[in-house]
Amino acid sequence: MDPTVKETVARCVSGDPADAWFDVVWAGPGKRFDTLVIAGGSIDPRATFRLTWYSHPTDRSAGSVLQGGPDAAWLRVYPSPDRRRDRSYYAGNYLSGGQTARDLAGKTPQLLHRPAVSPRCKALRVEIDNRGRPLDLGHLFIARAFRPDWPHNWGMVLEPVDNSPVDATPGGRRIPDRRPAPVRKTVRFDDLTEDEAMRFHDLGLRAGKTDPLLMIEDITQGRHQWRRVKLATLEDGAIPVTQTEGDLWSATLKLLEIIG
């Protein structure tokens, strides 16, 4: 739960699925969620995972299982972004359909899952099969999405932000210190109701520059979702909202990816 995804991690040395699991427990009447993200760490591109919802905070018997369980299917952390017939026969991922090492280079490992149905539960178990490799996990993010009636405007910007300082010697030689480049995502909403604008306003006040946010532009488009959807914070620490006319408001979000 630390606000970092690389420096502070939880580690499973064996990588065995029997060891690589953890429980999320909620107090009170239980929670329903529709988005789960684990960012950072050392998740293998071919890794799979499984979720189980429980009605009791500590009872893990079959009678407390609401959904999932030992017979549930294992899901791919990086699902295939396309159909096999759309891939080149000579591509390195022709058979597997997963992302290649070249695809994932420079990106923070991330497990992103949006279950079709999430019952109200007291606990959630996350199991990960990391193909037998040691497993590090960074930031855990679980939430319910807020969806305005109208989507954002055209013109969303995805912009890598160079983060590598470069020193120069007296002789003119450049010495770079290569560091991962976070992605800045900028979007604007011009058709918000006043209620929606105030939710954005409140969100900016609560989150500031520290609390993580996640924006999924289109849940039906999974082909590049793993490239476009990143755990982020508000770069400016606020969400400015503007009344344009009558009950119409606008808001601009500037999100900066969390990479460490």
Image (spheres, rainbow, N blue to C red):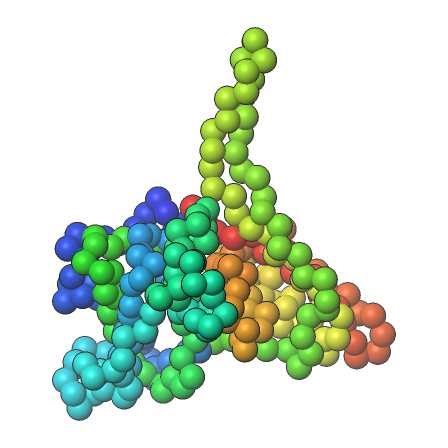
Residue extending furthest front?
Answer: 89
Give 192 or 99, whichever is nearer the viewer: 99
Tag count in the figure? 0
Residue 247 x, y percent position in the rendering: 79, 79
Residue 83 x, y percent position in the rendering: 46, 73
- State the quadrant of the N terminus: bottom left
Q: Residue at x 27, y 75 (%)?
A: 74
Residue 189 x, y percent position in the rendering: 71, 69
Instruction: Name which quarter of the figure residue 92 lies in.
Output: bottom left
The answer to whether any part of residue 120 appears in the image is yes
Instruction: Name which quarter of the figure residue 95 lies in.
Output: bottom left
Q: Residue at x 38, y 84 (%)?
A: 118
Q: Is residue 250 left or right of residue 142?
A: right
Q: In the figure, 175 relative to 2: above or below?
A: above
Residue 210 x, y percent position in the rendering: 50, 53
Residue extending furthest bottom?
Answer: 63
The answer to whether any part of residue 22 appears in the image is no
Give 100 or 213, whichever is nearer the viewer: 100
Residue extending furthest top?
Answer: 171
Q: Residue at x 39, y 61 (%)?
A: 93
Q: Residue at x 56, y 51 (%)?
A: 183
